[in-house]
Image: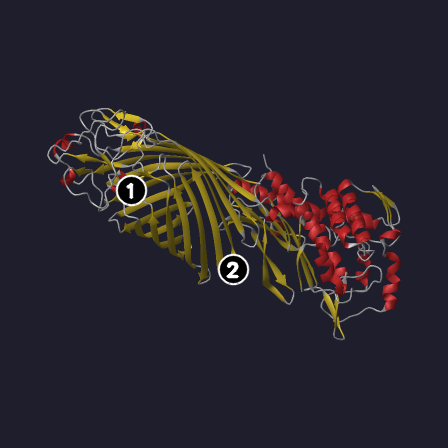
Amino acid sequence: MNASVSVRRGPCAVTLVRDRDHWAGRFVAMASPCDVLIEDVVSQMQAKQIVDAVAACAWRIEKKFSRYRPGSVVWDINDTAGAVVAVDDETASLLDFAATLTQLSDGRFDITSGVLRRAWTFDGGARIPSQEQIDALLPLVGWNKVQWNRPSLLLGPGMQIDFGGIGKEYAVDTAAALANRAAPGVSCLVNFGGDVAVVNARQDGQPWRVGVERPDRLGSTAEMVSLHRGGIATSGDSRRFVQSSGRRYSHILDARTGWPVERAPRSVTVVADTCTQAGSFTTLAMLQGRQAEAFLKASGHQFWIQ
Amino acid sequence: MTGNDDIGAKLAAAACALLGTAVCAPASAEESTNAWSIDSSFLYYGESDGRVQDVSAIVAAQRDFGDQRKLSATLTADTLTGASASGAIALDGPQTFTSPSGRATYTTPAGEVPLDDTFHDTRFALNATWSQPLAELYTLSAGAGFSTEYDYRHLGANVSLARDFNKRNTTLSAGLAWSQDDIDPVGGAPMPLSQMLDVGDQSHKLGSDSKTVLDVLVGFTQVLDRATVLRVNYSYSDSSGYLNDPYKVLSVVDPLTGDTITRVPAEEGPTGVYLYESRPDKRAKQSVYAEMKRAFGARVLRVAYRFMTDDWGIDSNTAEASLRWPLGASSYIEPQLRYYTQSHADFYRASLIDGEPLPQYASADFRLGDFDATTVGFKYGHRMANGSEWNARFEYYQQTGSIPSQQIIGNQANREQYPDLSAVIVQFGYRFGF
């Protein structure tokens, strides 16, 4: 009997190594390097199971919500804009969450604002779109133009949604919860490209130490954050911005105007109960522009701003 | 934008709805930095032949406040029962003693080393230590302790400062500890070298007394390589005040036979002449401790050596070794071996000779005599899936003492003078966090 087995290689590979006091699993998902650190209280087999579960979760969410992947839920929603679609529970929950962020930011955050990228290319270059270009896109932007009655979603023709700014943080928390289900009580740190969640405090009483990158020095870590449990997220324009006539335009767009938020911090890092909450705070803070710091202070969370 | 107070609550609620209840335990961030870790254990120490038995329960709690700020507290309750050697020598006939309270007597059968079996006590102790970084590379710890038992109260305080050097591979530390102990012996503290009197006669007893201890500690820790850590400590300890054991006596013996001088009690009281011990009211101890831990893969070997010397003439050496050996991913076994040897205090004597002038200091307490002790044991620990650990420790202790031959007089040579002692130690521990 002949059987053909296909082995997934390349970006789908998972590696596991033992470090001084933890297991470290690595893989690539959502265009980011991803880490799973597990306190050294489990066997190699258990560690492998945890990392596999986390990686599978990351790839599942990436596949399901990528706007670039034909056949993904988001692709289908955008592809059928103008007609009603019924969405599954998980997608509906993400839409509800996005709607809450829109409401809390008075419309500055909006999952329909992605079409503005047709005018804005945040590649570090100097091209600034004209007001006409932006005005042409604004009719396609605004959650208030969407009819959303869970589970029925109706986007206006030409409108698009994406879960940028929510999806990765959601994936981190969901993966961390899965890790806890695979090994209840074991301390795990899940890091998807700088968005971090820790489930369970470590038994040795030590915190996990997470480095926060400085936007002006990519790759160097400026600050070490001690985390026993909870989430950390960073929002920044270290890689994505436009510089024109001495002005630096952040990639954080105000969905109401179609223009970047003025005087937005280069980078905001927040510690919160979950990675999702931390990410929401960084996004809301960036949208505050020059008031970002005051906003974060009032929130009572631990934060770093640059 | 919506009022700031609302945002946190609304986001938390929205995140909960999104992630499900499994992910959002309420206020997990608060808890996360304030997690408690509890180490509880139950210990039994039992000496052979129905001598001292000690049962203790220990709860040690540590709370991490983040940024390396830690509070640790230990609560201990223990109960001591059984008998301990009074210091009097064995005789061919029975001996009767007045108990420490001065209100009753007890009798030791012929040929046996006298034990005072009226001994029982319950002790409670509480210690707490706070440690935090003081400045970059400096760590400050400060603690206080308190313990109380029927005849003893202890109050202590300590402070230490550690400084890291050499990319934190070297740590130097210095500490000071001070304690004040009040002793209120059952029936009062006897005057040193006063004679044990009849029941009801308290004319030789004084009230309570106290002692003060000051310790100075200097430590050095060096990471030698990725797998090896060396620690060396030097400590100086200065005690002053009442350093006697109020329940210990010496037999006064005939210079030829070596038998205790007999006495006739008025009604009820001792049948021999026994004097309460007398120790100096100062003691200065110095000790050096060196410990090396080395990891061989997942196995960790620890070897340690301590030398102690004091101005009472006691020198002691302790050597110990343990090896922690993992069994699978979640269990380990740790065999332990310890050897201890000490020389006697200058004023240690098995008995006092009738007719000779009384020395200023004298004690027949076996703990100030010459002895060796070997402890063998092992510990087994198991880490459970929920992260808690339980462990069990079993140790066997064997002590052999001797009395300098020139101190053994006449008939004493035919009798047991320094009985061997063995003890078992059994401990169960459970460590968990919440």
Q: Specify the quadrant that holds the C terminus of chain A.
A: bottom right
Q: Position of residue B274 (x, y in %)?
A: 23, 34
Check chain identity for marks 2 and 1: say if they share one: yes
Q: Could you tell me which chain the residue with mark 2 belongs to?
A: B
**Which residue corresponds to mark 2?**
B134
Q: Could you tell me which chain the residue with mark 1 belongs to?
A: B
Residue type at tag 1: Tyr
Residue A107 visible, this angle: yes
Colour scheme in use: secondary structure
Q: Position of residue B13 (x, y in %)?
A: 75, 45
Q: Position of residue B24 (x, y in %)?
A: 68, 43
Q: Quadrant of residue A179?
A: top right
Dot 1: what SS?
Answer: strand
User: Is residue B345 found left or right of A97 in the rendered image?
Assistant: left
Question: How many C-alpha atoms fall within 10 Å of the one at disc 2: few (<14), some, or many (≥20)?
Answer: some
Residue A8 visible, this angle: no
